[in-house]
Image (tube, grey):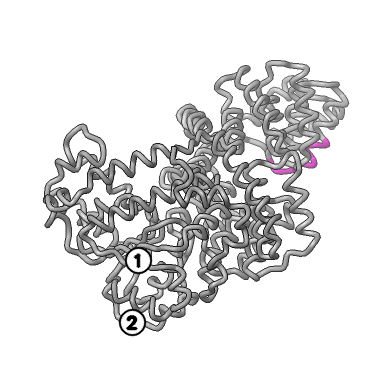
Amino acid sequence: MQPIPQRLALAAQHHQAGRLQEAEALYRGILQEAPRHPHALHLLGVLAHQSGRHQEAFDLINRALEAQGPHPVFLSNLAAVCLALNRLEDAVNHSGLAVRIDRNFADAYSNLGVALRRLNRLDEAEAAFRAALRANPNHVDARSGLGAVLHKKSRLPEALALLQDTVRLAPTHAQTRNDLGGVLLGLHRAEEALPHLQEAIRLRPTFHEAHANLGMALQALGRTEEALPYLREALRINPAYARGHDHLGHVLETQGKLDEALVEFQESQRLEPNNALALAGLSKLAVAGRFQLDEAMLRHMRQLAEAPNVLPDDRCRLLFSLAGWLDKSKAYDEAFEYYRRGNELRKEIDRVGGGANDLATQRMVVDRLIAYFTPDYFRRVAGFGSDSELPVFVVGMMRSGSTLTEQILASHPAVHAVGEAPDIPRLLGVLHQRIPGTEDYPDRLNRLDAPTALSVAEEHLQRLRQRGGAALRVVDKLLFNYLHLGVIATLFPRARVIHCLRDPVDTCLSCYCQNFAQSYLFKLELRDLGLYYREYERMMAHWTKVLPIRMHELHYEELTANQESETRRLLDYCGLEWDERCLNFTEAERTVKTASILQVRQPMYRSSVGRWRRYEKHLQPLLEALSGSEPEA
């Protein structure tokens, strides 16, 4: 028989080549002869870990350490096993000891970073990953781990740059592909995320996180039916994946399947009692009357909102969730304090992420559009574009009744709604490419000619027909299209434009009280909200004067007071025959992705009319800004 060193070397060769059965047989043969051989124990432990036998691996590597004494490689690999067993504090201790023995051990620093990240000790995790990269700048796991920490810390531009560079360095590293896809999702760039998440799954078919992220990317693109199988597959692979239950619950919620969504949020919270996403989902359903928050859960949410290691995004969710429940409970002063804290925290999160609230820029944009889109401009482009009546645009401020309007229209059999589609901003990019010149928008439109306008319009209409099939009208509810009505009227002079209006104070308060998925920096302070609203009003007043399209103003208060008559007026404006189903809009089977996701599943109500008076004593900065007594600069 060969001596043990030669057999150990041969076993290691089999191990590295992936011939695990041959390697395991040799390791076990050595241990029969020398039961305390540290390297055979350690390598057999590594093999057991790679085979998914984590408890066996833990026992074997511990025996190796007993035989050998503290060894940085043994300790680092034991930390990796502890991560698989979710023994995070043990992983911190073992990897921490490894790096104290060997200050340049990149693998151990990386394992330490993973454990600290999972414990939400993000500053320490960042330091550990950076130490790994000082030891080895091309350490892919450390790069990916640092990217994930930067994502959790809302430093998305930094995370994006690091992970894009890492994908170039290691294009077949599935974790990095998934992490990059997650960051792109966080930046609301779902279309760019798709290929990375698809590649992560191709590289590792049982990668449950990548399946879930791909499902959420498809959902963000409005492809809900495609999203659901990926979300369900993530949970089939790993039924204990709490975040996967959250994601599935959210998508079911958008479809109006609230009982099924409730089950998913409850399971997520059972798996991870401190999971803020699950608690927020349950709280939202409770506010809508679909779940009862008991005192124990409310106490838990309050405690968690004050806990030191809670991530900023999670704390923000908890603050807004508690505020919503307190509002429902008519504890308005306490509710407002939670709303205020939630917005203050969101402001800090956005500041770290590189955001800036620049009302001066918004004012300049409105000034420029008003100066450019004059009656002379519209006389010059008269006859441009398509005469199609297919497009319907719903515009206005957030929380103005726009989702309710869309849901009423979508209940009509001749209407298809595409939600908040980014089509018009994309169309502006197409115009920029097609029109020669160096000017910025809108000045480049000076060179727009009729053939270009028609071709761009027809391309857009073709996309709408692909989505809407035989529908007579396709509704686009991207509210910020109110800034682009000049281009819309140029390309689609027979389009319908529905301007949703609601009491300005109610509108602004509702924005302030909402934790939007996407950051809107102007809504985080009451004064800024009021000043932004005045700019929006100024823009819409201009369009009312100059736009060749006759807009339909739909007032939320009138719609909720006179549902049938206002619905008839709306359908008549859109050139649609009356259909009773538009009165029963809660029965429409369609996906709703906006902040009003649960409200549109309920019959029309008027309890939100005049809501601001419950908070009047807190709203002085907003009231002054809206009235014009607050200076603009």
Residue 236 in view here: no
The span picked out in magenta is 51-59
Look at 77% across and 18% down and name the residue there.
100
**Nearer the camera: disc 2 or disc 1:** 1
Q: Is residue 218 magenta?
A: no
Q: Which element type, helix, strand or loop, lies under badge 2?
A: loop
Q: Which mark is residue 125?
A: none
Q: Is residue 52 magenta?
A: yes
Q: Which residue is mark 1?
A: 553
Query: Which amino acid type is shown beneath numbered disc 2?
Result: Trp
Look at 39% across and 48% down and name the residue there.
535
The quadrant holding residue 405 is bottom left
Label 2 – label 1 distance at C-alpha: 19 Å
Q: Quarter of the image containing the C terminus?
A: top left
Look at 43% across and 56% down and name the residue there.
397
| For marks 2 and 1 on the same chain, the one whose residue lies earlier in the sequence | 1
Look at 28% across and 45% down and name the residue there.
369
Q: Quarter of the image containing the N terminus?
A: top right
Q: Which element type, helix, strand or loop, lies under badge 1?
A: strand
The image shows residue 65 at horizontal and vertical percentages of: 84, 26
The image shows residue 387 at horizontal and vertical percentages of: 17, 63
Question: Is label 2 in contact with label 1 (beta carbons under 8 Å)?
Answer: no
Placement of 531 over or under 282, stated as above or below: above
Q: Which residue is mark 2?
A: 578
Placement of 564 over or under 514, stated as above or below: below
The image shows residue 631 at horizontal and vertical percentages of: 46, 41
